[in-house]
Amino acid sequence: MEEKIFDVEMIYIENTLEGKYTVECIGRRRQNVKLSFSNVEGIEIDAKKPLEIKHSFIQMNESQPKIWNLKFTYPVNLIIKFVGKILIEVF
């Protein structure tokens, strides 16, 4: 599976259950793309072009959902792949 998403301003990554993740990308003009994955080993971000993060928040508390939010300084174009892990590439 491979998904190209353009002009992304924010990414929300949530671990909903053990091994199950959702990745939501919010772009310009509030266009949203939400992807779900199962049997995930991890998450990797590969920035082939410079990536500037304006704000990031990670919540890893056991009693709350595990969340990783990223807000970019400038909109970016992404390719999201699943290869045993979620691979987010900036292009």
Image: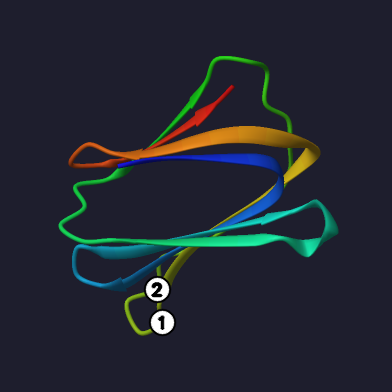
Residue 11 in the image: state x and y as whole percent. 60, 53
Res 76 quadrant in image: top right
SS of the residue at dot 2? loop
Residue 61 in the image: state x and y as whole percent. 40, 73
Q: Which residue is mark 2?
A: 61
Q: Are marks 1 and 2 in contact (CB under 8 Å)?
A: yes
Location of residue 49 with respect to 77 vertically, above or below: above
Residue type indicated by callout 1: Gln
Res 12 quadrant in image: bottom right
Q: Residue at x 21, y 52 (%)?
A: 40
Quadrant of the image containing the N terminus: top left
Q: Is residue 43 left or right of residue 3?
A: left
Location of residue 27 with respect to 60 vertically, above or below: above
SS of the residue at dot 1? loop
Q: Which residue is mark 1?
A: 64
Q: Residue at x 84, y 58 (%)?
A: 29
Residue type indicated by callout 2: Asn
